[in-house]
Structures are given as C-alpha cells and as structure tokens.
C-alpha cells in the first residue's frame, strides 16, 4: 500500500513540474476518457453531467435564511412544541404579504397563496379558528378535504394538481408520515428517497416552498430533539415579538 501511495505522489509531482514548466495543462494530465462525459452511458432516468457545464445560480428565499423557494423544508419536533402554531402563523404572513421576523422587506411579489394539508386537525374547529386569530387572509389559504375512495399521497397526481390549482407559494403538509403512502416505510432510506426527490421536483417546478412537518415520538430520539425544541421555541419567540397578538 505504501509503495502505491509513493508512486501516486511521484506522478503528482511530475505532473506539477510539467504544468509549471508550461509543457502541459492540468487537464491534459487526466485521461481523456475521464474528461469526456459522453463516454459514460446514460442510466435510466438520469445522465452524467460535468460540473463545468452547470450554470451557478443564487438561492431564492421565502424567508431568509430559513425557508427557501423551490425547495423542501423539514420542520421536526415532539408533540406540543408549537409546530402547528408556527406553520399557521407562516401561512398568515404569506397570505397577507407581511414581512417575516428579522426581515425588513415585504415578500417581493406581494401576498401569496398557501396550501395547507393536514391529517392531524379538523379544519372547521381547529385550523380555521387559529388562522382567524392569526389574522390570515382566508381567501388565499386552501386545504384539501379527502374523500373515502382515494388516499392522498405525495406521489399521487392529486398532490401536484392541488399545488397547481391553488397557485401556492407556500405548501405545508402536516404530518409527513400521513401522506407517504401505505407502501412506503418512512424508516427505510431506499423507500423514502424517491418520495422526497419527487416532492423536491414539485417545489422546483412550481417555485414554491414546501414545508413538511414531521412528528417525532416523545420516547424516540430524545437527545436529538432537545436541540429541535430550542429551535422551535426561538422561532415562536421571533414571530410573537414581531406580530404581537397574532400568534396562534
């Protein structure tokens, strides 16, 4: 092993010497087969890309630096830590076009629509009263009342259609576990990854922020959720201080 490492070091030194002397470039020291991405066959559903061909772009934000546009945000914590309160207050802010806590400017494009999907609380007796308390613009907030025949899941065509029809700038799903689908185990990375990739693609396609609320069992991951509790409390304080009397 040591002999192989020494040989690599010698090759690197020799290449550096050639580059400094003007005899060659760093690119010519690499095999042409490595440089030519076209030599690598495309795989089903994807293809090899060269980083030099990717055009850099800035991240757009709904609320800097917490909630990006065109991407997925995960809000995670134990029951009773204020996840729903925060998500409803965010809905109120977006629907009215108000400025976010610690932000001087209003949302650049004005008030936006919100799609709020929940399997945890009733709309009439819980969600709507709390939105009213938060002074939300109710005409800009939409939800989905599920029927008995078809189950709403992230990968169903219904989910994308809801985002499209509502023209939502902010999508909130509470909780994520309820909409994975009966054939997806949320504890298995190979099953959850395609779902998350699909959600991310929808966020990018419709240029909206998708917040997924994850309910953590109080007896699981207790050490990890202590920090998350602090984050949620800080968010709550920031919102409540900037929007007194509007925190639901």
Image (spheres, rainbow, N blue to C red):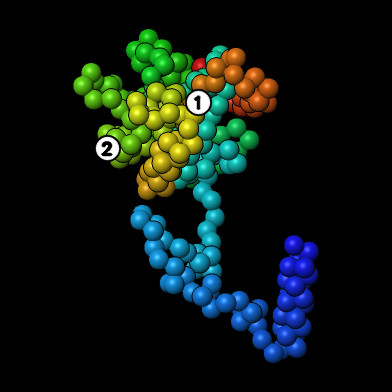
Q: Residues within 10 Å of mark 1 (few under 14, many from 20)?
A: some
Count of numbered tags: 2
Q: Percent from the top left, x then y, of residue 163?
A: 33, 37
Q: In this view, does 3 lie above or below 76?
A: below
Residue indicated by mark 1:
214
Asked if residue 158 lies left or right of residue 177, the reply is left
Secondary structure under tag 2 reads helix
Q: In which quarter of the image is the N terminus?
A: bottom right
Residue indicated by mark 2:
157
Q: Nearer the viewer, residue 206 or 47?
A: 47
Q: Percent from the top left, x then y, of residue 154?
A: 36, 34
Asked if residue 32 lies left or right of residue 139, the reply is right
Mark 2 or mark 1, which is nearer the start of the sequence?
2
Secondary structure under tag 1 reads strand
> Given the current orientation, which residue lies at the most extreme left position?
149
Q: Can residue 136 be seen in this view?
A: no
């Amino acid at each position: 092993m040591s002999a192989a490492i020494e040989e690599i070091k010698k090759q690197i030194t020799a290449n550096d010497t050639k580059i400094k002397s003007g005899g060659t470039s760093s690119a010519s020291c690499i095999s042409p087969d490595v440089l030519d991405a076209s030599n690598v066959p495309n795989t089903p559903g994807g293809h090899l890309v060269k980083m030099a061909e990717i055009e850099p772009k800035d991240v757009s934000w709904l609320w800097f630096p917490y909630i990006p546009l065109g991407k997925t945000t995960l809000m995670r914590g134990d029951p009773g830590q204020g996840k729903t309160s925060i998500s409803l207050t965010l809905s109120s802010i977006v629907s009215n076009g108000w400025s976010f806590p610690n932000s001087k400017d209003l949302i650049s494009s004005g008030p936006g629509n919100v799609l709020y999907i929940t399997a945890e609380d009733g709309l009439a007796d819980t969600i709507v009263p709390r939105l009213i308390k938060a002074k939300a613009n109710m005409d800009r907030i939409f939800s989905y009342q599920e029927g008995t025949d078809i189950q709403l899941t992230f990968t169903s065509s219904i989910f994308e259609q809801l985002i499209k029809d509502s023209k939502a700038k902010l999508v909130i799903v509470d909780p994520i576990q309820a909409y994975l689908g009966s054939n997806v185990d949320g504890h298995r990375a190979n099953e959850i990854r395609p779902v998350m990739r699909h959600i991310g693609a929808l966020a990018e396609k419709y240029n909206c922020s998708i917040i997924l609320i994850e309910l953590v069992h109080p007896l699981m991951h207790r050490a990890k959720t202590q920090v998350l509790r602090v984050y949620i409390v800080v968010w709550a304080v920031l919102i409540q201080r900037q929007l007194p009397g509007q925190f639901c």
